[in-house]
Image: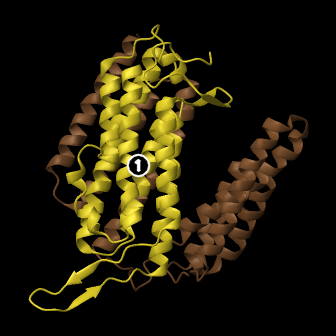
Amino acid sequence: MDAVYIAGLGIAFLSVIVAFYAILREQDDLHRILLTDLAEILALVLIALVATDLAEALILPGLVVGISELMAISEVFLVKESLSRPRYSPLSIEVMDSAPAIMSLALVLYGIVLSGFSGGALAGVGAIFYFMCRGHDERFAVIETASGYAWALWIFAFFIFMVLPEYWLFGVMTAGGAILLKVTGKMSLVGTMRGGHNE
Amino acid sequence: MNSLAVPAIGGAELHVIEFGDIVNYFSPYTAMLFAFAVLFTVIAIVSRPERQVDIAFGGDAYYTKDIQPEQLKFQRFMAIACGLATLGAVVSGDVFNFTLFTSMVGITNIGIVAAYKNRHVLNAAFQYGIVAMIATVPLFGGAAIILATTGTLSMWELFGSAIAVPLIAKAFLVLGVMGEGMAPFYVAKAEITRAPGAPYVLIIHVSSLLLFLRVVEIVLSM
């Protein structure tokens, strides 16, 4: 086996030990959440050490699983400590009143032109900006539903590639459009994270 | 490729489901686990939640705890998701898929108990969640070390005698599954079972037990 891999493994194990020791010593619950997130990243490091294309493909699901666990625990922590949202607006700059409409329109339009994952990210940034500046009383359920259907469509497009390869163009367009919707929807949720009414 | 090593612990394969190079399979052993997981998922779908009764100490009074419909829906959804994740894990023919399904079981387990707003239960769920998160380090670490040393994650090749899997990878895998489901250490989850909603809490135990049985088979076969 590669000497570099062994060395990397040694360093990773050392970091794991340090992280676990820190978790062991820490008493504050919030800090423990942050430390476990740190430990999770070391799991990704262990995968990344393999350094092949396959490892690259494995990091993404590992990351997703880690983040979803982190979100679940954070939600439990919020309920447990009965923390509530701040009642005041935490940030107010003049440009946040004038710019959002035109800026987010431009970003979303350009995102739609790009389509696919990067387009979705760009359109999502536009939506984040708008929600952060203007506030929002949107219905989370609707965004979630749209994003869920888009995801199903995306998977469906992959089945087109596998079952009917001759319709690949249709598959590409479906996948590109669906992932655009999905990433946009998910990212726009980030802009609403500082509160507001939701249903 | 599609035949297990001759002295397979779980018995010869009965049925093979191919998804490209990821080949899931049923052996008598995993088919048994699968049947159990299906059974308890069906129970979670059809049964109504229990209603715990608290007796006021020193008197005749007692009160039943109500389960709100939203909480019922959420718990049932999480229980079904947990059952499906268990189904995936027991028939998986790929080590990394197995670890992913295992951590999904961990997440849904937190979800089942987190729906209930009781300080003790939430505290237990929080501590349990921390352990489940930490457990992803040995879990994914074990899978990654297997990939690095043998060059494959397919159980079809790993189960053969030609490939030797390092002991530390096996130990990591078992440690990871134990952390996600806490299978042999049910005492650690005692507080969690104070949450009402019997069939849903039940699936927490069933899923972790099935996962543990499966990982034992995997580790012994490798």
What's the colour of chain B in the image? yellow
Q: Report the number of numbered marks.
A: 1
Location of residue B191 in the rendering, given as x and y in whole percent from the top left corner: 23, 63
Q: Chain of mark 1?
A: B
Residue that numbered label 1 is attached to: B207
Location of residue A111 in the rendering, given as x and y in whole percent from the top left corner: 74, 57
Please tell me whether residue B165 is drawn above or below residue A87 in the rendered image. above
Residue that appears at 82% across and 44% down: A172
Location of residue A48 in the rendering, given as x and y in whole percent from the top left corner: 46, 30
Location of residue B213 in the rendering, given as x and y in whole percent from the top left corner: 37, 36
Given residues A107 and B208, the one toward you in this image is B208
What's the colour of chain A in the image? brown
Given residues A175 and A88, the one toward you in this image is A175
User: Which residue type does callout 1 highlight?
Assistant: Ser
Residue A70 visible? The answer is no
Few, some or many C-alpha atoms within 10 Å of disc 1 (few <14, some 14-19, many ≥20)? many
Residue that appears at 66% across and 65% down: A126
Q: Secondary structure at mark 1?
A: helix
Residue A193 visible? The answer is yes
Residue that appears at 48% across and 38% down: B32
Give residue B149's quadrant in the image.
top left
